Amino acid sequence: MKLFITGIGTDVGKTIASAIITEALEADYWKPIQAGDLENSDSDKIKSYISNAKTKIHSNSYTLQTPASPHYAATLDGITIEVSKIKEPQTKNHLVIEGAGGILVPLNETQTIADIIQREYQVIVVSRHYLGSINHTLLTIEALQNRKIQIAGIIFNGDENPATESIILKKTNIKMLGRIENEPYFDQNVIAYYADLFRENLEKL
């Protein structure tokens, strides 16, 4: 199983969700493009959050210096991102793939994150509650559906908001895989707790 984790925007909780899913399935983890935060990258965070011994964390295809849109960060580094050079790591294990920002974040002049989502990938959308998140969530799901990309489900991040969650689920008919509450902190124990909560739904995908 190959699960691609995307968000409705930046800082909505993709890495925390990726850690939970990786731990729940004891999957391998791969972040194709890391832009900035190289001293504490998303791969570093995943490594610190998980506690199973099976997960392998694979190297980024592109490691960019600036925390910015990949196309701009690459320009500042004097390179151009080529989708053909983003090679999925070989593994016999489940694979969790974390995107960068949302699915229409540009990689170069013509391609976006959506262009690295392969046909066999199932996408999990992470939605965080804020004013405007309904619109951003529905737009993300519509964009995925228009590209005929498989959507495995949605994870809500933040305290329960029945009005928001119910309208999104009703309009999209997408399965809710779980909710991550507004925790005061995340560590291996908290990630393991959510992994136990999410595991059954993830194993059914």
Image: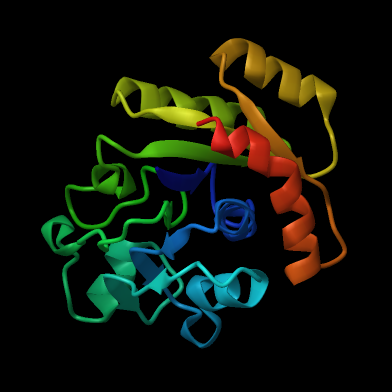
Q: Position of residue 70 (x, y in %)?
A: 33, 64
Q: Is the residue 50 above or below the residue 92 in the image?
A: below
> Residue 23 appears in which quarter of the rendering?
bottom right
Q: Is 162 placed left or right of 16 in the picture?
A: right
Name the residue at 42% across, 46% down: 4
Q: Where is residue 141 in the image (x, y as percent from the top left)?
A: 47, 27
Question: Is residue 7 at least partly visible in the picture?
Answer: yes
Name the residue at 33% across, 77% down: 63
Q: Nearer the viewer, residue 163 or 125?
A: 125
Q: Position of residue 171 (x, y in %)?
A: 59, 12
Q: Where is residue 175 in the image (x, y as percent from the top left)?
A: 60, 23
Q: Is 202 placed left or right of 151 in the picture?
A: right
Question: Is residue 132 at least partly visible in the picture?
Answer: no
Q: Is the residue 130 above or below the residue 48 in the image?
A: above
> Residue 29 appears in which quarter of the rendering?
bottom left
Give the colour scheme shown: rainbow
